[in-house]
Image: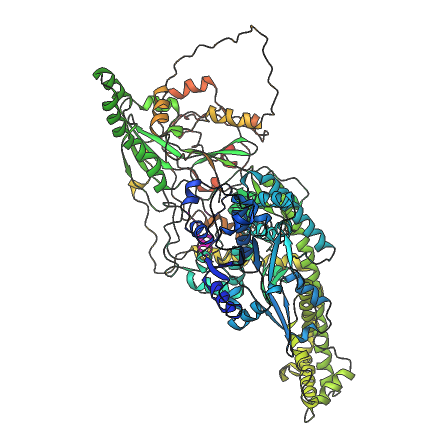
Amino acid sequence: MQCTLILTEGDSAKTLAVSGLGVVGRDKYGVFPLRGKLLNVRDGNLKQIQENVEINALLKILGLQYKKKYDTDDDMKTLRYGKVMIMADQDQDGSHIKGLVINFIHHNWPSLIQRSFVEEFITPIVKASKSGQELSFFSIPEYIEWRENTDNWKTYKIKYYKGLGTSTSKEAKEYFSDMARHRIKFRYSGNEDDTAVEMAFSKKKIEERKEWLTKWMEEKRARRTQGLADEYLYNKDTKAVSYTEFVNKELVLFSNTDNERSIPSLVDGFKPGQRKVLFACFKRADKREVKVAQLAGAVAELSAYHHGEQSLMSTIINLAQDYVGSNNINLLLPIGQFGTRLQGGKDSASPRYIFTQVSPVTRSLFPLHDDNVLRFLFEENQRIEPEWYCPIIPMVLVNGALGIGTAWSTNVPNYNPRDLVENIRRLIKGEQPKPMMPWYKHFRGEIRRIDSRRFVCYGEAAKLNEDTIEITELPVKVWTQEYKEKVLEPLMETAAAGKDKDKDKDKDKDKGEASKKQREPLVTDFKEYHTDTTVRFVVKVAKEKMHALEIEGLHKVFKLNNVINTTSMVLFDAAGCLKKYNSPEEICVEFFETRKNKYIERKKFLMGMLKAQALRLTNQARFIIAKIQGEIHMENRRKANIVEQLIKMKFDPDPVKRWKEEQRKRELKESGEIDLEEEAEVEQEDEEDEKKADKKLATHLSDYDYLVGMALIRVSEEEKDKLLAEKDNKLQEEDRELADLNLNIKKAGKKTGSDDKPAKGKKKTAAFAAEVLPAKDAERIVPEMDNEMKIKYEKIDKPKTEKVKKEPGEKAEKKKRTKKEGADIKKFMKKEIKKEEPLDSDISISDEDADEVNTDDEFESELDRMDDDAPPKRQTRGIKKPLVELSDSSQDNDDDVVEVDEDEKENKKKPAPKRKNVPDSDEDEYKPMKKISARPAPTKKAGGAPAAKRNRIISDSDSN
């Protein structure tokens, strides 16, 4: 009953505990290191719990037994330890570990929670020391509050403790010597504690967790708006906390951090790790390529990254990937093997062997001038990445987002950068944005609208002959190797298994033969002709099955369609609160307001800078005139006399330097951080008067160095006139800001254009081999909208109605069931591949100025560059009739859904006429997309090429 088991966060924490126990003794204390986070047992799988090594070890060490209630003292005596004390880091992950241990005990033995079985051992997160005096703080808000109420806080030496490993063995002994101060008890305060713990960890309490986190975020924003400090749980007088207090004040910090790590910001589209990478790249300003592994180390150093570098290297690789389904605009360049569509990026090379650098277009998306008005964060007095960057278009829509946090998850598809630029320009003009459809760079399939929030994505297939088809594109996020293993191979392998079962089960020979024939495989053979950027499967279909496949829908049978949802677009807004958005247009509008406010701030900053520069030039011109007229004498005089003379003549200390210092102090004040230069000045207060005077003189000299440090050649009449003219130009630059800001895009455009040109003496990239290209004489199979899919989503969107009970004796008329063509294919699919993981299910897609978003030639060169490595499109010989006869009359309907009626199904059965090759233009695919527009069925003009192009994502060119 008097013994305590100390559960530590890893082996390093165990070492600290063992060092501290040297003071209090080992007789009543045991130490067990937890390797990683404990399993959440509340809704866990029984087998998984029983096989968990950490849980089994805890049961054995503590002597706990499932289904036993520890209500009495006699029951407690059966345990090997009377208390469990958790010793974890004082960060958010440490709070999560505490919560998981509490959840484990509360779920299985709630009586132990009521008997104060669980305790915690807290350590300082900040220490302030001065002249032998030492103050410990157990939370950052507590430290900030002390600093605001202490006038001479700058005279203290501040040290931050990021984890238990930061403390020394000497400090461990100090902690355990004052056990009463560091040992905190968890007290049970009633049913509200049970409710709080269950709410935090039960999978059934998702909505309650959303309300809990939303309320906390709103309170945090309100406190920040009012200038109040954040709430904190621990201070020097804390002796015990309730479970409700722990959940609402400490565990909530982890839940919010978990969401911040998993869900990006609406403003820049980044998660914290991605933002740290971009910050480090901008700060390094490398013009040469660097190894990914080396860049990861630099990011960790420059941005105070405290997690494993392996995850950081994965983040860097993801930012540079450019295969189909990844980034529409990769912000880093992939120099080496960064992964392909073959395995969805998993086939990237080791970070030690691949290189990267910032893409030329990145700085045009994130203008350099914005850095002056961003709110940068501070950690341990180190200036790190900003709260968020502010690009000129919403990058979260350009590259999409995918993440699962606490109570929330997000799923944002990719959209066309040209569409986003066009919508931002419309917002600048005061117009409403146009509806947008998902778009993926180099994707050669087709995306159609189901309803306002759902789209169906089709791959590409064509018929070569009566028993052969070719698949030349897969749906977005379906990788080539995965498709081969989970779709094509099972369609071949299940045939043999089906035949064996028929032999065992069917004794009757005739029945066996019939069943064997029924289970004949759909696919008899397939060949692969892929590259790292293209897909081509040539598939042999079983004899006499092609017609049935066409009736059933080849795209459905071969899983060449999936659904893209926009029903879960959850993002952090500019204020740091989670918000769910109903459409990409809503995201555009909110982004535009944030971007516009940032332009206002930037203009104010630039005006202040220009005025300071103009004042500096005025002083320099005055100084030159005074020197020419002999009013200033510097030769053979002491420095102090020169400075004194300049002050008497009312020359200003360096205006630009002073203005920058004011901006830096304002930034530090807003963030609540220490001014290291002022701190250094305070530490030098006790120095000798003579040294202090020398340093003061040196400071004054540096303030006037912009005058006395000018080259002699500048003390001439020509230089005087030049400075006066430059001063006038600076004052006029306030009105020329728009033209100046556009330089970023122009420079990036020119750089991109030069990168696209092949180097002198370098051979051009070889063309694709004929076998990897779509067959020229293939007959494209136009995908049909699956009626079952349409009905499914119509039911989801349809409001629920109460069922009407039928009167007694009333009988419903039974409809006669008629066997449809393709029924045997459905039966085959249900029986043979139902165990396979479906690939056609709903897909999850994986953190303003008018001149800056202007689509001039330079900016468009970046978007055009996306065409360079694109695989060629199919040059079709024949094409089947579209599902809907499209005409100009339907162009104004934004919510058109492609539907199929019975007449068109009949027309679908007829083979399409052969036609000549009509290559598509790459420009079509990158123009701003419009709603599904109508157009006539393909017809062949006399003596010429057919009038209609192959149907893909419907764009401006298609409607023409």
Q: Is residue 534 above or below residue 251?
A: above
Can residue 285 be seen here? The reply is no
Question: Which of these two is toward me, 212 or 76?
Answer: 76
Where residue 337 sits, quadrant-wise, is bottom left
Q: How many numbered dots are placed on residues in this image? A: 0
Question: Which of these two is toward me, 212 or 241?
Answer: 241
The stretch drawn in magenta includes residue 316: yes
Say left or right for 781 vs 564.
Answer: left
Horizontal and vertical percent for residue 917?
Answer: 36, 33
Can residue 370 be seen here? The reply is yes
Horizontal and vertical percent for residue 79?
Answer: 49, 52
Q: What's drawn in magenta, residue-wise?
A: 314-328
Q: Is residue 200 above or below residue 776?
A: below
Horizontal and vertical percent for residue 752?
Answer: 48, 56
Say left or right for 860 vs 585.
Answer: left
Horizontal and vertical percent for residue 64?
Answer: 47, 48
Q: Is residue 214 above or below residue 317?
A: above
Residue lying at the far bottom in this picture: please name it: 636
Where residue 471 sits, quadrant-wise, is top left
The stretch drawn in magenta includes residue 899: no
Question: Which of these two is toward me, 904 or 547?
Answer: 547
Where residue 552 sits, quadrant-wise, is top left
